[in-house]
Image (cartoon, rainbow, N blue to C red):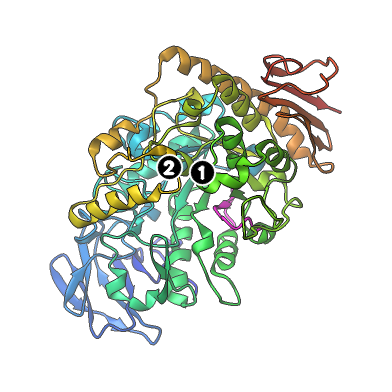
Amino acid sequence: MTQDTSPTADGKAVSRHRWGATPDGKGRWHFGLWAPSAQKVALWLDGAETAMRKGEDGFWSVSAEAEAGLDYAFVVDGERRPDPAARRQAGDVHGPSTLVDPAARRWKKNWAGRVWDEAVIYEMHVGTFTPEGTFKAASAKMQELADLGITAIELMPVGQWQGARGWGYDGVLPYAPHPAYGTPEEMQDLVETAQAAGMMVILDVVYNHFGPDGAYLHAYAPEFFEEERHTPWGAAIDFTKPAVREFFIENALYWLRDYRLDGLRLDAVHQIIDPSPHHVLVELGERVHELQFDRPLHLITEDERNEPELRDTGCYVASWNDDYHHAVHTALTGESEGYYAPFAHDPIGDLVLALTRGHVEEGQPRHGKETRRGRPASHLPWTSFVNSNQTHDQVGNRALGERLVSLADPRAAEVAHAMLLTSPFVPMLFMGEEVGETAPFLFFCDHEGELARLTREGRQREFKDFLSFGEEVPDPNAEETFERSRPFQGPPEQMQHWRDLTRHLLELRAERIVPLMTSGRAGPARVARTGPRAISALWPFKDGYVVARINLGSPPDTPPTTEPHDFAIGDPAADPFAFALIVSRN
């Protein structure tokens, strides 16, 4: 099932989605909804109803004269509900949708994109990134990030959910930018401003579940979901259905085309289970690359399975590498609860593996684990792994939302920062990390009534494996919890120190390391443990090599020979926490 096109009045082709409302360029709009078991469906447009026609594939459709700005909804067996593919809502997720055409945007300047080797990602939550919490306010900060050396911003999900506050992973209208952040036009302005500053824009999208409040697809089309299986967050989606696959593939194409995004990060793809011969994620990747835009497009996954398969297709450039995070975190904090337990056994040894191969767990037996995870992935480019010292998940899914710099020795945190930003994997910073922010990032939402109670109690249960945290879990529904999660609250002197450190490291990366990376890899990494908590790493490239000396608690057993370095923290021959970098060009 592919989208068709029709000519506009000026002869240009426009895409027509099966789902939702799209204009034909001649004053009429096409409306589509998949509701295979519905007996009667009508379009409610500007106060009047028009019957829709059902096709053999279960899609109901109609064409009507309309203009942008009008309110509309679908009336399914007598119940009036919003369009599940609405591009904008008139109000909350329960009311009518509003006609808007993001494809009508006239971009002021062309954008050629950036190659993936240059990626330095900055993960951002729009609602807390600025005091205003809007696309417009975030736009004013883009040049500042670019000047720091950031080359890509990654927006946490923006698909609309009920209420004002939230992380975005419980959205129910994945085509509609969250109104608390601003309008579709203001989101496009943010994209254009970031790109004008030289940064790519990546959007985090959630294709594995819908949120608990306002997901009317359950009523429209119960066939959209599996009868038996559930994800940890709600009913599992049935990706064997062509209409279901198209809902999400159209969404991906829509964001990339109409918002001129440079890429998407697909949340928790291990919960996108599809027994079809041609997996929906492979089809999605192929459809994206068929667009043939005049800029590179980058698809990234989050996959707990440590599977290289999607990256092997060539359609996905990278996956978040939690193994690297877990090794660094346990090495710096000594924590061993929950999912940290296998990494706490020998975090330095695990870090050696991560710096050598990318993933740590590749199917081998692991201390304290009964099941094996992953498959060998060292054949992938180093840039196929997005490494991080903290993310919204790893900070916000702590009971008290502490950042790494609040949990570790300050000098150790600086060493980990330097290691992240100068190794040849793709580094990702979580907003505020660039200035050493210590304010927490907590889990917050905006539920009411019974749902608020269930969320609060579920948050308490979530930490049963993290016994050291006790019972001090902030109420996720409290506005105070949201306000406490705003970054950039640290002491000015500390923030300036970290900002200068970040800028210096990213200048070194852009000027010296990225040119080597683009020359191509020249063999496997050579990484060795040189002391109980000391590592020496060498990454060879066709045009040179990068060497790092890393002390995370002890100096090496045998001090390295004196050699000129390009950057250093402390003395790697003697200090327990130290870092030295050598970048050599042939």
- Quarter of the image holding residue 112? top right
Position in image of residue 124 (x %, y %): 44, 38
Q: Nearer the viewer, residue 54 or 279?
A: 279
Q: Are marks 1 and 2 in contact (CB under 8 Å)?
A: yes
Residue 115 visible in the displayed image: no
Q: Nearer the viewer, residue 119 or 16?
A: 119
Three-letter amino acid code of the residue under disc 1: Glu
**The residue stretch that appears in magenta:** 292-307
Q: Nearer the viewer, residue 500 or 586?
A: 500
| Residue 337 circle label | 1
Position in image of residue 67 (x %, y %): 25, 60
Question: Along the horizontal axis of the image, is 209 left or right of 550?
Answer: left
- Quarter of the image holding residue 333? top right
- Which residue carries the number 2 mark? 467
Which residue shows up at 49% across the image and 77% down it?
240
Which residue shows up at 74% across the image and 39% down it?
518
Which residue shows up at 69% across the image and 33% down it?
423
